[in-house]
Amino acid sequence: MDRRTFLKTAISAGALATAGGLAAPAISQRAAARALRLVPHADLANFDPIWNSAYIARNARASDAVASINRWSAREPMGAMIKAIENELVAVDDNTFRWALKKPYPKMLLALGKIGTPCCFVMPARIAATDPFKPIGEYVGSGPMRFIKSDWVPGAKAAFEKFADYAPRQESASWLAGGKSILADRIEWVTMPDPATASAALQNGEIDWWELVLPDLVSVLRKNRNVTVDINDPMGVIGFLIMNHLHPPFSDVRARRAILMALSQEDYMRAYVGDDDSLWKPMAGYFTPGSRLYTEEGGEILKGPRKLDAAKQLLAESGYSGQPVTCMAAQDLANHKAWGDVTADLLTRLGMKVDYAAVDWGTVVARRAQKSPPGQGGWQMYVISQYGVECIDPTNKYIRANGELAQNGWATSPQIEAEVTAWYAAKTLDEEEAITRRLNKAALDHVVYAPLGMHLRHFAWRKNLSGVGRGPIPFFWGVSKTA
């Protein structure tokens, strides 16, 4: 259970994020000022998510919403953009706050309702007022479940109980939006690092639902008459190979282009999903295949036979002279491990000296923040994955190229940033599509990172569960269990 899934379960996130995109309250996103009123209701019912992204808990005040939005905007790129044009965000009284901008922000609902982290969780002001760059230590939110901290065993188990005073909206649930009707009294999330152990536990009825089924165990589970296996989300998961833009050799765009020229997305995807070609798709760009903004503009470098000799020549022109290249890959995430192994082999075939850091995910997260040279605790490459839903448009934080703020190895490109800014200001789908085509080409020319392809994942659950739906993470509302 990763931290983003934990928070969405413990606190409850975007009331606007839906399976079809965004739920759209009948308000104008082009208004530059709006007075927002919290609907007081002891059992949490009927909160209208106007320009907010979470249900307001009992006794919540406008000051809680204001503090939560301020915390969110300190870390979220769209939140920072809104802050830059903000006149004021103030509580008018206990039930009303006013948000005034210097100019309209067309992507306001998208910003507040997106499913990708950081989400705009609404929490008590005293918690929201803590350092936004440090984890919160108390999980008090507004969802239909309560986190039972006394039962928490870090790295082993997290428990949640139904919140009796919660009343869901009278509508169907859709991902993080709509009526969150919890039918189970208690949910326990058990961490089982060994896939074989998890598979056996599911088949034996020791657990009811397995979130991350390894592809090579799918056929085994499908033979069990008490187990259902299905694709969890048709938008899948997208692999990234991140390169450090601050230090050689990848501070030179020619070295980054050499990687694009040489890598085989088929090798990367098959290393994880196996030989079933229905489980993966190539990507000649940065946006999720099948999404409305998917484009292959500028993607020729990723197509066709791989050009290893030409890539070696480009690498030599970049000035690479045999120094070690530190590549990190989390061994506790099966797809990351597979992609790390493929990357190490690719670098070796390119004639590069590989320093393969086979570490856990926590170490990757900590080390990737280091800007020091690779030989002094820094790094040059690492692999990562994101939900496909997080890559359907330029809100994907890894496509940014704003230097010190960029989360992809500190890429810097005024052209990319200009296109991203233009997309946020676009008012029509035609405008968005034209901008995204230019952005895709600019990002590939600069090589903000290397896209590795998209693969599908499976959920598996006992057949005495009903109501299990598709989505990038497990959604427990509407799920029930019979004896």
Image: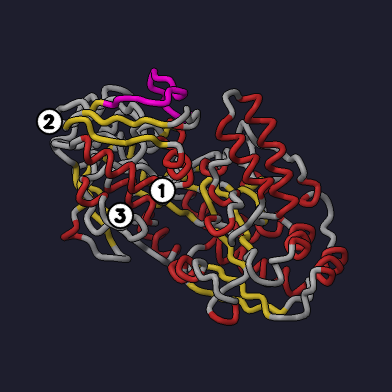
Apparent side of residue 333 relative to residue 413 in the rendered image (left or right):
left
Looking at the rendered structure, the kind of residue marked 3 is Trp
- At 66% across and 36% down in the image, what residue appears? 436
Mark 1 and mark 2: Cα distance apart in space: 28 Å
Q: Is residue 112 above or below residue 238?
A: above
In the picture of the structure, the residue carrying the numbered disc 2 is: 42
Q: CA distance from mark 3 to mark 2?
A: 29 Å
Query: Which residue is rendered at x = 71% and y = 81% of the image?
Result: 323
Q: Residues within 10 Å of mark 3 (few under 14, many from 20)?
A: some
Q: Are marks 3 and 2 in contact (CB under 8 Å)?
A: no
- Give the residue drawn at x 23%, y 41%: 64
Real-space Cα distance between discs 3 and 1? 22 Å
Instruction: Quickly name the residue at label 1.
Output: 118
Quadrant the C terminus occupies: top left
Mark 3 highlights which residue? Answer: 189
Our reading of the magenta stretch's main secondary structure is loop
